[in-house]
Amino acid sequence: MRQTVHVDLGERAYDVRIGPGLIAECGTHIAPLLARPRVAVLTDETVGALHLEALRAGLARADIAMEALALPPGESTKGWSEFTRATGWLLDQKIERRDIVIAFGGGVIGDLGGFAAAVLRRGVRFVQIPTSLLAQVDSSVGGKTGINAPQGKNLIGAFHQPSLVLADTDVLGTLSARDFLAGYGEVVKYGLLGDAGFFEWLETNGPALAAGDMEARVRAVTRSVEMKARIVERDETEEGERALLNLGHTFCHALEAATGYGARLLHGEGVAIGCALAFELSARLGLCSQEAPSRVRAHLKSMGMKTDLGDIEGDLPDASTLIALMGQDKKVVDGKLRFILARDIGDAFVATDVPTDAVEAVLRDALTR
Ligand code: NAD
Protein backbone atom coordinates (compact mmCIF):
# COMPACT_ATOMS: atom_id res chain seq x y z
CA MET A 1 0.00 0.00 0.00
CA ARG A 2 3.07 2.25 -0.13
CA GLN A 3 3.06 4.90 -2.85
CA THR A 4 5.60 7.53 -3.89
CA VAL A 5 4.87 10.66 -5.87
CA HIS A 6 7.97 12.43 -7.11
CA VAL A 7 7.73 16.21 -7.36
CA ASP A 8 10.09 17.03 -10.20
CA LEU A 9 11.39 20.51 -9.56
CA GLY A 10 14.99 20.14 -10.68
CA GLU A 11 17.34 21.05 -7.82
CA ARG A 12 14.35 21.33 -5.51
CA ALA A 13 12.84 17.92 -6.42
CA TYR A 14 11.56 15.65 -3.64
CA ASP A 15 9.48 12.58 -2.90
CA VAL A 16 6.09 12.42 -1.25
CA ARG A 17 5.83 8.98 0.34
CA ILE A 18 2.32 7.88 1.21
CA GLY A 19 0.92 4.94 3.17
CA PRO A 20 0.42 3.42 6.61
CA GLY A 21 3.37 2.85 8.98
CA LEU A 22 5.64 5.62 7.72
CA ILE A 23 6.14 7.27 11.11
CA ALA A 24 7.48 4.03 12.58
CA GLU A 25 10.15 3.93 9.88
CA CYS A 26 10.66 7.67 9.44
CA GLY A 27 14.30 7.53 10.59
CA THR A 28 15.22 5.38 7.58
CA HIS A 29 13.65 7.91 5.22
CA ILE A 30 15.15 10.97 6.90
CA ALA A 31 18.66 9.69 7.70
CA PRO A 32 20.01 10.19 4.15
CA LEU A 33 19.22 13.92 4.43
CA LEU A 34 21.11 14.50 7.67
CA ALA A 35 24.58 15.92 8.20
CA ARG A 36 24.38 14.92 11.89
CA PRO A 37 21.91 12.57 13.65
CA ARG A 38 19.69 15.22 15.24
CA VAL A 39 16.49 17.00 14.19
CA ALA A 40 14.25 19.75 15.57
CA VAL A 41 10.51 19.08 15.39
CA LEU A 42 7.71 21.64 15.40
CA THR A 43 4.30 20.24 16.21
CA ASP A 44 1.07 21.26 17.93
CA GLU A 45 -0.06 20.14 21.37
CA THR A 46 -2.84 17.88 20.08
CA VAL A 47 -0.70 16.05 17.52
CA GLY A 48 2.21 16.00 19.95
CA ALA A 49 0.17 14.30 22.69
CA LEU A 50 -1.09 11.66 20.24
CA HIS A 51 1.89 10.91 18.01
CA LEU A 52 5.13 12.55 19.15
CA GLU A 53 6.42 9.50 21.02
CA ALA A 54 5.84 7.34 17.92
CA LEU A 55 7.85 9.87 15.89
CA ARG A 56 10.62 9.86 18.51
CA ALA A 57 10.72 6.05 18.39
CA GLY A 58 10.72 6.03 14.57
CA LEU A 59 13.70 8.40 14.54
CA ALA A 60 15.50 6.55 17.35
CA ARG A 61 15.39 3.35 15.29
CA ALA A 62 17.84 5.09 12.96
CA ASP A 63 19.77 6.61 15.93
CA ILE A 64 18.43 10.09 15.24
CA ALA A 65 17.85 12.29 18.31
CA MET A 66 15.06 14.84 18.35
CA GLU A 67 14.02 17.94 20.24
CA ALA A 68 10.43 19.11 19.90
CA LEU A 69 8.38 22.25 20.46
CA ALA A 70 4.59 21.89 20.67
CA LEU A 71 2.63 25.04 19.82
CA PRO A 72 -1.06 25.51 20.65
CA PRO A 73 -3.37 23.90 18.05
CA GLY A 74 -5.47 26.04 15.73
CA GLU A 75 -5.29 28.75 13.09
CA SER A 76 -4.43 31.52 15.59
CA THR A 77 -1.01 29.86 16.04
CA LYS A 78 -0.20 30.84 12.44
CA GLY A 79 0.76 34.41 13.33
CA TRP A 80 3.79 36.50 14.31
CA SER A 81 3.71 35.66 18.00
CA GLU A 82 4.03 31.85 17.73
CA PHE A 83 6.27 32.26 14.69
CA THR A 84 8.69 34.37 16.76
CA ARG A 85 8.55 31.75 19.50
CA ALA A 86 9.25 28.92 17.02
CA THR A 87 12.19 30.63 15.31
CA GLY A 88 13.64 31.65 18.69
CA TRP A 89 13.39 28.06 19.86
CA LEU A 90 15.07 26.74 16.69
CA LEU A 91 17.95 29.17 17.23
CA ASP A 92 18.18 28.08 20.88
CA GLN A 93 18.43 24.49 19.61
CA LYS A 94 21.43 25.66 17.57
CA ILE A 95 19.88 24.50 14.31
CA GLU A 96 22.46 25.14 11.62
CA ARG A 97 22.32 25.55 7.85
CA ARG A 98 22.85 21.85 7.16
CA ASP A 99 20.29 20.63 9.74
CA ILE A 100 16.71 19.58 9.11
CA VAL A 101 13.55 20.97 10.68
CA ILE A 102 10.52 18.67 10.78
CA ALA A 103 7.00 20.10 10.57
CA PHE A 104 4.81 17.46 12.25
CA GLY A 105 1.15 18.39 12.20
CA GLY A 106 -1.66 19.82 10.10
CA GLY A 107 -1.52 22.70 7.66
CA VAL A 108 -0.98 25.25 10.42
CA ILE A 109 2.25 23.64 11.60
CA GLY A 110 3.32 22.84 8.02
CA ASP A 111 2.89 26.45 6.89
CA LEU A 112 4.48 27.97 9.99
CA GLY A 113 7.27 25.38 10.22
CA GLY A 114 8.04 25.69 6.53
CA PHE A 115 8.25 29.47 6.76
CA ALA A 116 10.45 29.24 9.86
CA ALA A 117 12.78 26.93 7.90
CA ALA A 118 12.69 29.29 4.91
CA VAL A 119 14.01 32.26 6.88
CA LEU A 120 16.09 30.65 9.64
CA ARG A 121 19.75 31.38 8.89
CA ARG A 122 18.55 32.42 5.38
CA GLY A 123 17.05 29.00 4.80
CA VAL A 124 17.42 25.49 6.18
CA ARG A 125 15.91 22.33 4.73
CA PHE A 126 12.74 20.86 6.17
CA VAL A 127 10.69 17.69 6.08
CA GLN A 128 6.90 17.70 6.15
CA ILE A 129 5.20 14.95 8.13
CA PRO A 130 1.58 16.00 7.59
CA THR A 131 -0.94 14.54 10.01
CA SER A 132 -4.27 15.98 8.86
CA LEU A 133 -5.98 14.90 5.64
CA LEU A 134 -5.86 18.49 4.42
CA ALA A 135 -2.11 18.68 5.00
CA GLN A 136 -1.49 15.29 3.34
CA VAL A 137 -3.39 16.12 0.17
CA ASP A 138 -2.58 19.78 -0.13
CA SER A 139 -0.58 22.00 2.19
CA SER A 140 2.50 19.78 2.67
CA VAL A 141 3.19 19.65 -1.08
CA GLY A 142 4.17 22.56 -3.30
CA GLY A 143 6.30 24.75 -1.07
CA LYS A 144 3.87 27.51 -0.10
CA THR A 145 4.75 28.45 3.47
CA GLY A 146 3.70 31.35 5.62
CA ILE A 147 1.69 32.92 8.39
CA ASN A 148 -1.33 35.19 8.68
CA ALA A 149 -1.13 38.96 9.16
CA PRO A 150 -3.70 41.19 10.86
CA GLN A 151 -4.51 42.36 7.29
CA GLY A 152 -5.38 38.87 6.07
CA LYS A 153 -4.58 35.20 5.78
CA ASN A 154 -1.28 33.87 4.40
CA LEU A 155 -0.02 37.37 3.57
CA ILE A 156 3.48 36.83 5.00
CA GLY A 157 5.37 33.92 3.51
CA ALA A 158 7.83 32.37 1.13
CA PHE A 159 8.05 29.61 -1.42
CA HIS A 160 10.23 26.97 0.21
CA GLN A 161 9.97 23.38 -0.98
CA PRO A 162 10.36 20.58 1.57
CA SER A 163 13.15 18.03 1.06
CA LEU A 164 10.78 15.13 1.73
CA VAL A 165 7.12 14.58 2.63
CA LEU A 166 6.04 11.53 4.66
CA ALA A 167 2.26 11.15 4.65
CA ASP A 168 1.50 8.36 7.11
CA THR A 169 -2.14 7.48 6.47
CA ASP A 170 -2.40 5.67 9.84
CA VAL A 171 -2.40 8.97 11.75
CA LEU A 172 -5.58 10.08 9.97
CA GLY A 173 -7.33 7.63 12.33
CA THR A 174 -7.11 10.05 15.27
CA LEU A 175 -8.53 13.07 13.40
CA SER A 176 -11.95 14.25 14.53
CA ALA A 177 -14.70 13.50 12.03
CA ARG A 178 -15.04 17.23 11.43
CA ASP A 179 -11.34 17.75 10.65
CA PHE A 180 -11.32 14.66 8.43
CA LEU A 181 -14.26 15.93 6.38
CA ALA A 182 -12.72 19.39 6.15
CA GLY A 183 -9.68 17.77 4.51
CA TYR A 184 -11.99 15.80 2.27
CA GLY A 185 -13.18 19.14 0.89
CA GLU A 186 -9.72 19.58 -0.66
CA VAL A 187 -9.79 16.00 -2.02
CA VAL A 188 -13.09 16.68 -3.79
CA LYS A 189 -11.57 19.90 -5.13
CA TYR A 190 -8.99 17.92 -7.15
CA GLY A 191 -11.69 15.85 -8.84
CA LEU A 192 -13.70 18.96 -9.58
CA LEU A 193 -10.82 20.95 -11.01
CA GLY A 194 -9.19 18.37 -13.24
CA ASP A 195 -10.27 14.73 -13.02
CA ALA A 196 -13.94 13.84 -13.54
CA GLY A 197 -13.08 10.13 -13.19
CA PHE A 198 -11.61 10.78 -9.72
CA PHE A 199 -14.73 12.71 -8.70
CA GLU A 200 -16.86 9.77 -9.87
CA TRP A 201 -14.64 7.39 -7.88
CA LEU A 202 -15.15 9.62 -4.81
CA GLU A 203 -18.92 9.56 -5.29
CA THR A 204 -18.72 5.77 -4.96
CA ASN A 205 -15.85 5.38 -2.49
CA GLY A 206 -16.13 8.54 -0.35
CA PRO A 207 -18.19 6.88 2.41
CA ALA A 208 -15.75 3.93 2.76
CA LEU A 209 -12.83 6.36 2.77
CA ALA A 210 -14.43 8.40 5.57
CA ALA A 211 -15.20 5.20 7.50
CA GLY A 212 -11.50 4.28 7.56
CA ASP A 213 -10.87 2.08 4.49
CA MET A 214 -7.07 2.32 4.30
CA GLU A 215 -6.72 1.37 0.66
CA ALA A 216 -9.26 4.03 -0.32
CA ARG A 217 -7.45 6.58 1.86
CA VAL A 218 -4.08 5.82 0.29
CA ARG A 219 -5.58 6.04 -3.20
CA ALA A 220 -7.32 9.35 -2.50
CA VAL A 221 -4.19 10.93 -0.95
CA THR A 222 -2.00 9.62 -3.78
CA ARG A 223 -4.26 10.88 -6.59
CA SER A 224 -4.61 14.28 -4.90
CA VAL A 225 -0.84 14.62 -4.42
CA GLU A 226 -0.19 13.51 -8.02
CA MET A 227 -2.51 16.19 -9.32
CA LYS A 228 -0.98 18.87 -7.13
CA ALA A 229 2.56 17.77 -8.01
CA ARG A 230 1.93 17.90 -11.77
CA ILE A 231 0.45 21.41 -11.52
CA VAL A 232 3.24 22.67 -9.23
CA GLU A 233 5.88 21.26 -11.58
CA ARG A 234 4.45 23.32 -14.41
CA ASP A 235 3.90 26.49 -12.37
CA GLU A 236 5.86 26.49 -9.11
CA THR A 237 5.27 30.10 -8.13
CA GLU A 238 1.68 30.54 -9.33
CA GLU A 239 2.18 32.62 -12.43
CA GLY A 240 -0.74 30.85 -14.12
CA GLU A 241 -2.01 27.29 -13.94
CA ARG A 242 -1.32 26.81 -10.22
CA ALA A 243 -4.22 29.17 -9.54
CA LEU A 244 -6.54 26.27 -10.50
CA LEU A 245 -5.75 24.84 -7.08
CA ASN A 246 -7.67 27.81 -5.69
CA LEU A 247 -11.01 26.45 -6.94
CA GLY A 248 -13.54 27.48 -4.30
CA HIS A 249 -10.98 29.63 -2.46
CA THR A 250 -12.18 33.13 -3.36
CA PHE A 251 -15.57 32.37 -1.80
CA CYS A 252 -13.82 30.45 0.99
CA HIS A 253 -11.53 33.32 1.98
CA ALA A 254 -14.46 35.75 2.15
CA LEU A 255 -16.38 33.31 4.36
CA GLU A 256 -13.34 32.69 6.56
CA ALA A 257 -12.85 36.44 6.98
CA ALA A 258 -16.56 36.87 7.80
CA THR A 259 -16.45 34.10 10.41
CA GLY A 260 -13.18 35.19 12.00
CA TYR A 261 -10.90 32.32 10.82
CA GLY A 262 -12.06 30.11 13.67
CA ALA A 263 -14.14 27.13 14.67
CA ARG A 264 -17.29 28.45 12.95
CA LEU A 265 -15.80 27.52 9.61
CA LEU A 266 -12.71 25.37 9.03
CA HIS A 267 -10.64 26.09 5.92
CA GLY A 268 -11.57 22.82 4.17
CA GLU A 269 -15.25 23.36 4.98
CA GLY A 270 -15.02 26.77 3.34
CA VAL A 271 -13.34 25.20 0.31
CA ALA A 272 -16.19 22.69 -0.08
CA ILE A 273 -18.85 25.40 0.15
CA GLY A 274 -16.73 27.59 -2.13
CA CYS A 275 -16.51 24.81 -4.76
CA ALA A 276 -20.29 24.42 -4.73
CA LEU A 277 -20.66 28.20 -5.16
CA ALA A 278 -18.05 28.32 -7.94
CA PHE A 279 -20.03 25.71 -9.88
CA GLU A 280 -23.23 27.68 -9.29
CA LEU A 281 -21.54 30.81 -10.57
CA SER A 282 -20.28 28.90 -13.61
CA ALA A 283 -23.81 27.63 -14.34
CA ARG A 284 -25.28 31.12 -13.92
CA LEU A 285 -22.73 32.47 -16.42
CA GLY A 286 -23.77 29.73 -18.87
CA LEU A 287 -20.36 28.05 -18.71
CA CYS A 288 -21.51 24.69 -17.41
CA SER A 289 -24.78 22.77 -17.19
CA GLN A 290 -27.23 23.27 -14.31
CA GLU A 291 -26.69 19.61 -13.38
CA ALA A 292 -23.02 20.12 -12.50
CA PRO A 293 -23.59 22.28 -9.36
CA SER A 294 -26.42 19.95 -8.25
CA ARG A 295 -24.11 16.96 -8.54
CA VAL A 296 -21.35 18.72 -6.56
CA ARG A 297 -23.76 19.67 -3.76
CA ALA A 298 -25.34 16.19 -3.73
CA HIS A 299 -21.95 14.54 -3.13
CA LEU A 300 -20.92 16.97 -0.39
CA LYS A 301 -24.29 16.54 1.32
CA SER A 302 -24.15 12.75 1.09
CA MET A 303 -20.80 12.90 2.90
CA GLY A 304 -22.39 14.95 5.70
CA MET A 305 -20.36 18.04 4.82
CA LYS A 306 -21.23 21.69 5.04
CA THR A 307 -22.57 22.58 1.60
CA ASP A 308 -24.62 25.76 1.96
CA LEU A 309 -24.09 29.09 3.67
CA GLY A 310 -26.98 28.10 5.96
CA ASP A 311 -24.80 25.27 7.31
CA ILE A 312 -22.47 27.87 8.88
CA GLU A 313 -23.51 28.65 12.45
CA GLY A 314 -24.48 32.25 13.27
CA ASP A 315 -25.16 35.25 11.08
CA LEU A 316 -23.25 36.07 7.92
CA PRO A 317 -22.86 39.53 6.38
CA ASP A 318 -24.85 40.38 3.23
CA ALA A 319 -23.71 39.61 -0.31
CA SER A 320 -22.01 42.95 -0.98
CA THR A 321 -20.04 42.78 2.29
CA LEU A 322 -18.88 39.27 1.34
CA ILE A 323 -17.75 40.61 -2.03
CA ALA A 324 -15.85 43.38 -0.27
CA LEU A 325 -14.13 40.69 1.81
CA MET A 326 -13.14 38.92 -1.41
CA GLY A 327 -11.59 42.17 -2.57
CA GLN A 328 -9.06 41.99 0.25
CA ASP A 329 -7.92 38.60 -0.93
CA LYS A 330 -4.41 38.59 -2.39
CA LYS A 331 -5.70 36.93 -5.56
CA VAL A 332 -7.02 40.28 -6.75
CA VAL A 333 -5.14 41.33 -9.88
CA ASP A 334 -5.47 44.97 -11.03
CA GLY A 335 -8.64 45.44 -8.98
CA LYS A 336 -10.52 42.65 -10.79
CA LEU A 337 -11.73 39.58 -8.99
CA ARG A 338 -10.15 36.40 -10.21
CA PHE A 339 -12.26 33.29 -10.00
CA ILE A 340 -11.68 29.68 -10.85
CA LEU A 341 -14.73 28.65 -12.85
CA ALA A 342 -15.64 25.39 -14.57
CA ARG A 343 -16.94 24.20 -17.91
CA ASP A 344 -17.82 20.86 -16.33
CA ILE A 345 -16.83 18.61 -13.45
CA GLY A 346 -13.10 18.03 -13.95
CA ASP A 347 -12.66 21.03 -16.26
CA ALA A 348 -11.80 24.21 -14.32
CA PHE A 349 -10.14 27.33 -15.70
CA VAL A 350 -8.94 30.73 -14.47
CA ALA A 351 -11.35 33.60 -15.20
CA THR A 352 -9.92 37.07 -14.58
CA ASP A 353 -12.88 39.35 -15.22
CA VAL A 354 -16.00 37.95 -13.60
CA PRO A 355 -18.97 40.36 -13.43
CA THR A 356 -19.60 41.35 -9.83
CA ASP A 357 -23.40 41.27 -10.24
CA ALA A 358 -23.36 37.56 -11.11
CA VAL A 359 -21.27 36.85 -8.01
CA GLU A 360 -23.60 38.96 -5.90
CA ALA A 361 -26.67 37.13 -7.27
CA VAL A 362 -25.15 33.73 -6.45
CA LEU A 363 -24.34 34.89 -2.90
CA ARG A 364 -27.80 36.48 -2.42
CA ASP A 365 -29.48 33.20 -3.44
CA ALA A 366 -27.13 31.21 -1.25
CA LEU A 367 -27.80 33.45 1.77
CA THR A 368 -31.54 32.88 1.51
CA ARG A 369 -31.38 29.10 0.97
P1 NAD B 1 -4.66 22.44 11.48
O1 NAD B 1 -3.20 22.34 11.29
O2 NAD B 1 -5.18 23.47 12.40
O3 NAD B 1 -5.22 21.02 11.89
C1 NAD B 1 -6.58 20.87 12.17
C2 NAD B 1 -6.79 20.29 13.58
O4 NAD B 1 -6.50 18.90 13.52
C3 NAD B 1 -5.87 20.88 14.64
O5 NAD B 1 -6.61 21.02 15.82
C4 NAD B 1 -4.80 19.80 14.82
O6 NAD B 1 -4.29 19.78 16.13
C5 NAD B 1 -5.60 18.55 14.56
N1 NAD B 1 -4.84 17.42 14.05
C6 NAD B 1 -3.95 17.39 13.03
N2 NAD B 1 -3.55 16.13 12.79
C7 NAD B 1 -4.21 15.34 13.68
C8 NAD B 1 -4.25 13.95 13.93
N3 NAD B 1 -3.56 13.09 13.17
N4 NAD B 1 -5.03 13.50 14.93
C9 NAD B 1 -5.78 14.36 15.68
N5 NAD B 1 -5.80 15.67 15.49
C10 NAD B 1 -5.02 16.16 14.50
O7 NAD B 1 -5.41 22.70 10.08
P2 NAD B 1 -5.42 21.94 8.70
O8 NAD B 1 -6.85 21.79 8.36
O9 NAD B 1 -4.54 20.76 8.70
O10 NAD B 1 -4.74 23.02 7.75
C11 NAD B 1 -5.31 24.30 7.58
C12 NAD B 1 -4.22 25.28 7.27
O11 NAD B 1 -3.55 24.88 6.08
C13 NAD B 1 -4.72 26.68 7.02
O12 NAD B 1 -3.92 27.59 7.74
C14 NAD B 1 -4.53 26.88 5.53
O13 NAD B 1 -4.28 28.23 5.19
C15 NAD B 1 -3.34 26.03 5.26
N6 NAD B 1 -3.21 25.58 3.88
C16 NAD B 1 -2.01 25.76 3.27
C17 NAD B 1 -1.82 25.33 1.98
C18 NAD B 1 -0.47 25.46 1.33
O14 NAD B 1 -0.35 25.20 0.12
N7 NAD B 1 0.56 25.82 2.06
C19 NAD B 1 -2.86 24.71 1.28
C20 NAD B 1 -4.09 24.54 1.94
C21 NAD B 1 -4.24 24.97 3.24
Image (cartoon, rainbow, N blue to C red):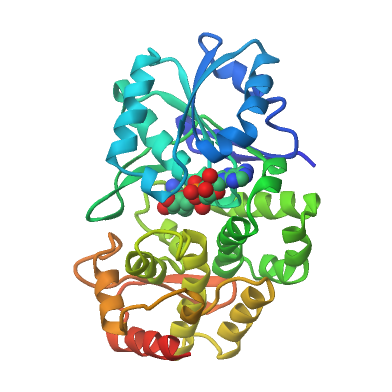
Q: Residue farthest to the left?
A: 334
Percent position of residue 297, x then y:
59, 80
Residue found at x 67% / y 69%: 199
Percent position of residue 27, x then y:
65, 20
Left/right of residue 155 with respect to residue 106 in the rendered view? left
Quadrant into which the N terminus falls: top right
Quarter of the view holding residue 264: bottom left
Residue found at x 52% / y 43%: 140
Identify which residue, 7 or 271, lies in the foreground. Answer: 271
Residue found at x 44% / y 90%: 284
Identify which residue, 25 or 196, lies in the foreground. Answer: 25
Left/right of residue 363 with respect to residue 100 in the rendered view? left
Residue found at x 24% / y 65%: 328
| Total residue callouts | 0
Percent position of residue 301, x then y:
64, 77
Name above or below for residue 350 compared with residue 293. above
